[in-house]
Amino acid sequence: MAFEIPSTALSQISDQSRRCIERLQKHQAETVDLSDRPNSKLAAVLVLLYEKSGELRVLLTTRSKSLRSHPGQTALPGGKVDDTDEGVVETAYREAFEEVGLPLQSPQMHTICVLRPFISSAKLLVTPVVSLLTNLSLLDNLKRSESEVDRIFDHPLEAILDPSIVAKEPLVEKGSEDWPYDTELYHPTDIQLPWLANSTYRMHRFRSTASPIKGLTAEILIMTATIAHNRDPIYQRYAPGQFTMFNDVLRVLDSEQHSNSSSRLGTPVGIATGVV
């Protein structure tokens, strides 16, 4: 899926930011066939990038603490695919409109690319849609959905690769509810995922001006930043033995679900846990 961005839009940002956007445009996502998946298992998020003071930043939200799923956590605007949506791109923009008031259609918002899907802890297949905003005045009119969003904030994209970059920001207080860790800017832990055949997963956490950036949101931003800046993070991205290819993760997830279903019928099925 190729998207065109007018040269007039790219001329409004710095050379460094333009090169980042061009790399994202050229990115070839890992091929994943989701045609047999019901919409109830599909979702999309909007990775909205814009330039401030010569650096690319990304729009983020803190989810309402009254929500049943992931209350108070950092998120990209997004949600499940509706049957009326023509695709994940429409889903991402519709959800951003509903959650933070971004216009559904604006000549100042340009779709850059669609990344490969990610699997959430709720076993949703979440597709990131990356977009460039060239008119920052639209940010002045954002209005959060009070039932879904507590805060709207942003974060330097490159700080996802090098957390020291964010030290210049007015960060949340260390030791507070929003950063209860003993590290300054970045806090990783390796955990096991029972719902994914007990595979190992590195949980990344980044300190911000609001809630910690972690989990699925962090994973999506790591991929976005790695592509845009054409370099790896300064930290170790994966835990030893962690799956690095999405199709391998999807294969294990499907095997796990099939195993659980067959076990309930009295016919155990082995789980493939290796990378193939």
Image (cartoon, helix red, strand yellow):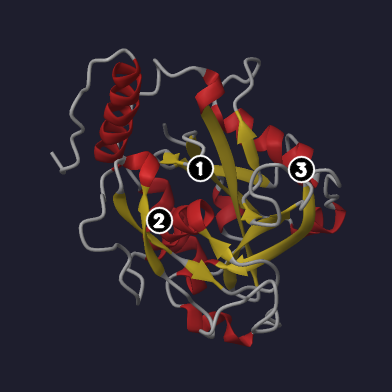
Q: What is the crowding at mark 3: few (fewer than 14 residues within 10 Å), some, or many (at least 20)?
A: many
Q: Is residue 155 left or right of residue 236?
A: right
Q: Residue at x 59, y 64 (%)?
A: 13
Q: Which residue is mark 1?
A: 128
Name which quarter of the figure residue 222 lies in.
Answer: bottom left
Quadrant where the C terminus lies? top left
Marks 2 and 1: CB-CB under 8 Å? Answer: yes
Q: Residue at x 33, y 33 (%)?
A: 253
Quadrant where the N terminus lies? top left
Which of the two discs, 2 and 1, labels the residue nearer the N terminus?
1
Q: Amino acid at mark 1?
A: Pro
In percent of width and height, residue 102 lies at: 76, 44
Foreground residue, 173 or 54? 173
**Label 1's element?**
strand
Q: Which residue is mark 3?
A: 99
Q: Residue at x 49, y 56 (%)?
A: 215
Marks 1 and 3: CB-CB under 8 Å? Answer: no
Real-space Cα separation, disc 3 to disc 2, in angstroms: 23 Å
Which of the two discs, 3 and 2, labels the residue nearer the N terminus?
3
Q: Residue at x 34, y 75 (%)?
A: 235
Q: Amino acid at mark 3?
A: Glu
In percent of width and height, residue 191 lies at: 37, 59
Mark drawn on residue 190: none
Q: Amino acid at mark 2?
A: Met
**Label 3's element?**
helix
**Label 2's element?**
helix
Real-space Cα separation, disc 1 to disc 3, in angstroms: 16 Å
Q: Which residue is mark 2?
A: 223
Q: Is residue 141 left or right of residue 267?
A: right
Looking at the image, the residue that sits furthest to the left is 276
